[in-house]
Image: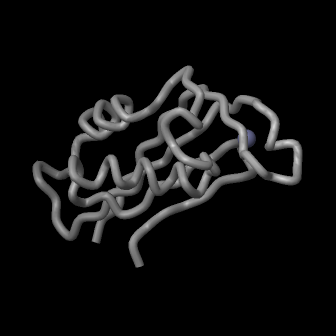
Amino acid sequence: MFEIHVREEFAAAHYLPGHSGPCANLHGHTWVVEVTIRSGGLRDGMVIDFIDVKAILRELLPDHSLLNDIIQNPTAENMAHYFYSGLKPKIPGVYRVTVWESSRSGATYFED
Ligand SMILES: [Zn+2]
C-alpha cells in the first residue's frame, strides 16, 4: 500500500456561533489542508501526480472567504468533512483529509 500527501493553504475567516470561547467572534486563519491518497499499486511509478491533486484541491479551497457562508458551523472537523466530500468524487483514492487552523491544532476526517 502506498500513501501520498498533498498540502495546500488558504486564508479565510470564520466564527463559531454559540461557542463559549473567543472563537465565537469573527477571526481569520491561514488554514492548511492536507489530503492523503492511498493506492495498492502505482501507475508510471506514482499513486497520482501531485500536480493533479494540487489543482483539484485548489479549486475547492474557499480562499479569502467567510467560511460560515459555505459551511454550517465551520469548525476544523466540519471543514475536514467538507473537503473530503468534495475531493472524494474527483479523486477516488482519497483516504483522509486534515485541516489545520494553526501549526498545533487540526482535525481529520476519514471513513471508518
Ligand atoms: Zn478559528
Q: Give the residue at x 87% y 43%.
A: 22
On the rendered structure, is 97 left or right of 4?
right
Q: Nearer the viewer, residue 25 or 95?
A: 25
Q: Give the residue at x 24% y 36%.
A: 52
The quarter of the picture where the C terminus appears is bottom left
Q: Nearer the viewer, residue 68 or 108?
A: 68
Q: Which residue of the protein is positioned furthest toward the right in this rendering? A: 21
Q: Give the residue at x 33% y 47%.
A: 86
Ligand 1: quadrant of the figure: top right
Q: Nearer the viewer, residue 21 or 41?
A: 21
Residue 47, position in %: x, y?
23, 54
Residue 70, position in %: x, y?
49, 37
Seen in the picture, residue 103 relative to 1 is either above or below; the reply is above
What number of labels is visible? 0
Q: Which residue of the protein is positioned furthest toward the top in this rendering? A: 64
On the rendered structure, is 107 left or right of 112?
right
Q: Give the residue at x 65% y 31%.
A: 30
Q: Nearer the viewer, residue 111 or 27?
A: 27
Residue 5, position in %: x, y?
41, 51
Residue 84, position in %: x, y?
39, 54
Q: Which residue of the protein is positioned furthest toward the bottom in this rendering? A: 112
Q: Say which quarter of the image contains residue 59.
A: top left
